[in-house]
Amino acid sequence: MPTQIWTVKKLLLWTTGYFTQHGIPNPRLDAEVLLSHLLEKSRLQLYLDFDMPIFQEHLTPFREFIKKRIARTPVSYLTNRKEFMSLDFYVDERVLIPRPETEQLVETALTAGSEVSLEGASTLRALDLGTGSGVIAISLAVQRPESDIIATDISEEALAVAQKNAETHNCTEHITFLKGDLFEPVTARHFDWILCNPPYIKSAERDTLSADVRDREPEIALFAGDEGLAVIRRLIAEAPDYLVPNGKLIFEIGDTQAAEVCSLLEAQPAYRTYELLKDYAQKERIVLASI
Ligand SMILES: C[S@@+](CC[C@H](N)C(=O)[O-])C[C@H]1O[C@@H](n2cnc3c(N)ncnc32)[C@H](O)[C@@H]1O
C-alpha cells in the first residue's frame, strides 16, 4: 500500500483494485466489510464518511487484513463475524462459515413446526446434529424459547465456538452441547425435530472448490466420502429411532444429490412422507421427511 494521506474513499478504491488484481471474487464488498469492521462503522456510514482520513492505528491492521485476504482467508474469519437469521455469530477457523441455504433449513423447521404434534408436551424437543458454530440450534432457541435442544458435533473445537455463541445469545439454558459421532452421544429418543446440515461434498470434488473453502474451512465440515453421502446415509437410517410419531427430519443436501437421497428415503419404510424444497437458486437443497 503506497505511502500517502488515505481517506475512506481512496482506501476502498485502492483495495478494490488490489483485490481485483489478485482474483478476489467480490473485491469492493470485501474491502467495505473489512474497513467497516475495523472502523466499527456500518457500510452505509463509510459512504457518508468518504473523505474521512484514515490514520496509522487503522492502516496497520487493515494492511494485515489485505495480506490475509489475498492469501484466501475468508472475510468472516478475519472479522470473526457472520450474520445468520438476523443474529450475529462469532466464527473462526474451527467452524464452517454458516451459509444462507441453512437459514432456509431453520425457516422450514419453524414452518413445519406448527404442524408437529408435541404429544401433549409444551416443550419442543429438537436435536441439531453437527452443530458447528451453533447457528441452527441457537436460531431455533431464540425463535422458539420453549425449545429443549441437544446439539452435537464430532469436533470439540466447534463445540467451543457453539458454546460461546449460545452464551452471547443467552440460550445456554435451552441447549445441551454433546461431543460425539452423529447419534452416538444422544440417549434421549423423543425428538419432535432432528435438524442437520451435514458434510456432503464428494472427496473427488475437492479441486473444484475455491481456495477460500478448500484450504480454510474445516475438512470434517465439508467432505463425506466418495459419494458425499457418508453422513446422510447414516442420518436417514438412524433418525427414525430418535423421533416421536409425526416427528420431522429436516436436513440439507448438495445440489446434485436429490435423486440419490430420494432413493435412500424410499428404501427406509419408517418415513411416511418426504418433500424436497428448493433454495433461492431453484436447486433442491432441503429435505423434510416425516415418520
Ligand atoms: C456442514 S457443517 C455444518 C455446521 C453448522 N450446523 C452450519 O450449518 O453452519 C457440518 C458439521 O458437522 C460436524 N460433523 C461432521 N461429521 C460428523 C459426525 N460424524 N458426527 C457429528 N458431527 C459431525 C462437523 O464438525 C461440522 O461442524
Image (cartoon, rainbow, N blue to C red):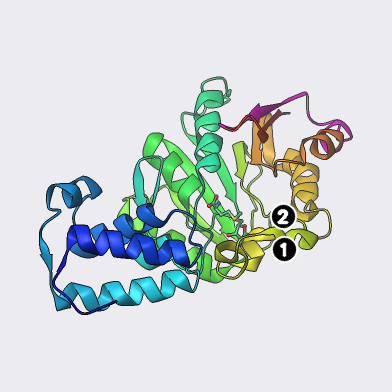
Q: Is the CB of the residue bearing disc 2 within 8 angstroms of ligand 1?
A: no
Q: Residue 8, image x and y in percent?
A: 18, 60
Q: Residue 145, image x and y in percent?
A: 38, 37
Disc sitting over residue 206 in the figure: 1
Q: Which residues are magenta?
A: 264-280
Which residue is farthest right? 267
Query: Residue at image x 58%, y 57%?
Result: 152
Query: Residue at image x 78%, y 24%?
Result: 272
For the residues bearing labels 2 and 1, Cβ distance under 8 angstroms: yes
Q: Residue 90, image x and y in percent?
A: 38, 60
User: What residue type is disc 1 on?
Assistant: Arg
User: What residue type is disc 2 on?
Assistant: Ile
Q: CA distance from mark 2 to mark 1?
A: 8 Å
The kind of secondary structure element at disc 2 is loop
The kind of secondary structure element at disc 1 is helix
Q: Is residue 212 magenta?
A: no
Q: Name the image quarter holding the N terminus.
A: bottom left
Quick one: label 1, few (<14), some, or many (20+) residues within 10 Å? some
The image quadrant in which ligand 1 is located: bottom right
Dividing the picture into quadrants, the one containing residue 68 is bottom left
Query: Residue at image x 49%, y 39%?
Result: 103
Precedes in sequence: disc 2 or disc 1: 2
Which residue is disc 2 drawn over? 201
Dividing the picture into quadrants, the one containing residue 96 is bottom right
Residue 78 horizontal side relative to residue 119, left or right: left
